[in-house]
Image (cartoon, helix red, strand yellow):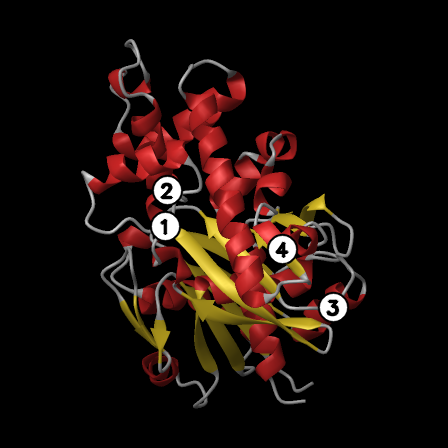
Amino acid sequence: MSDGWILAGDIGGTKTALGLFSPEDLQKSIHSRSLPQARVSERYPSQEFSGLIPIVETFLKKNRSILNGYPIWATFGVAGPVLENRCQTTNLPWVIEGEVLEKNFGWKKGTVHLVNDLVAMGWGINVVRSSGGVHWLRAEGSDKRGNAVLVAPGTGLGEALLEEDHGSLRPWPSEGGHTDWAPFNPEQVRLLQFLWTQFDHVSSERLLSGPGLLNIYRFVSQGFPAPTLLDRGIPEEHLPEHITQAALDGTDPCSPPTLGLFVEILAQEAGNMALKALATGGVFLGGGIPVKILTFLKESSFLERMAQKGRYRELLDTIPVGVLLQEETPLWGAAYEAMLRMPV
């Protein structure tokens, strides 16, 4: 592999993480089934910058002595749809363009690649699935080849299709989180009717996200004697984390059934995605929420509900299901994607 550095980025509405990787170090970590280590990495508050270029400038200036003039291959995972190596970010007033980054820093044409953040996370599964970065809810078959899917509830609902490619997983972007949500039973029909009073379109993201968790809580707590968490003056943006913690601690009567309904709906969506991709290689749960509720997930009926698809129950009962544990998975995935593009 030619001399050079890999610059990887995970760009989100709250924070931007950058890491500088040696391709040789990255290859060694994959071959030794250990989690990769960046030579240097930094996190920056995204909202304090006018765009990605000032963040990259700050990072490169600080690490100029390490770079030592060697060429850079960069991949940035960005929260938003990427079209023709350009992205209008979803939760930031930024436009990021690969060609503009190349010209600004004097990098060779074609060295900067933008990918959706779920695509970066999908690439990262290749790095973490054999190195302790996945907690398996069902491990049987986790070493088998086959297509896989990624379902990642966090600030929103991200999804990706993972195509089996000679033993590796090649991610393909999807905006499946914004497709129509369908109820499973009478209680969920009532939930849908409740959401119809607020939204013209009820997508899966309206339920499987931080704001979605709050939507479910409002439904569950209807008519419940005060005080609920809604009556405690907690800022709305912090309510999802309070609901999750209260469900785990048992300190609020509405939170456990809220989280239980959330997990049921997550299982249904995971099963839907698994059928659409024939994901015999696995269902992976990423994003900020699953790892935080891992204890609850392990004790829930997630696997049973995921398999409730009529004639395909037996197939879904054989699919491995894992939770991504490492927050750095998208950053490592961006580095992995850049490594694949580097000339030998």
- The amino acid type found where label 2 is placed reads Leu
Disc 1, SS: loop
Residue type at the position of mark 3: Arg
Alpha carbon distance from label 1 to label 4: 20 Å
Distance from the alpha carbon under mark 4 to that under mark 2: 25 Å
Task: Return the residue nearer the eye: 258 or 115.
Answer: 258
Q: Residue furthest right?
A: 32
* Residue 111 visible somewhere in the drawing: yes
Cβ–Cβ under 8 Å for marks 1 and 2: yes
Task: Tell me the residue that label 1 is attached to.
Answer: 181
**Is 32 left or right of 13, judged from the image as shown?**
right
Give the image location of residue 218, x and y in percent: 29, 27
Query: Do the CB atoms of the residues marked 3 and 4 lie less than 8 Å apart?
Result: no
Q: Position of residue 154 (x, y in %)?
A: 43, 46
Question: What is the quadrant of residue 105 in the picture?
Answer: bottom left
Q: Which residue is mark 4?
A: 312
Select label 3 or label 4 by which is in front: 4
Residue 331 makes an appearance in the image: no
Say whether residue 317 is left or right of residue 162: right
x, y (%) of residue 120?
51, 65
Residue 145, numbered circle: 3
Residue designated by label 2: 207
In this rendered view, identify the residue nearer to me: 275 or 38. Answer: 275
Determine the image quadrant of residue 66: bottom right
Closer to the N terminus: mark 3 or mark 1?
3
Work out whether mark 3 precedes mark 2 in sequence or the reverse, and give the earlier one. Answer: 3
From this view, report whether residue 123 is shown above or below residue 285.
Answer: below
Q: Disc 3 versus disc 4: distance between alpha carbons?
A: 20 Å
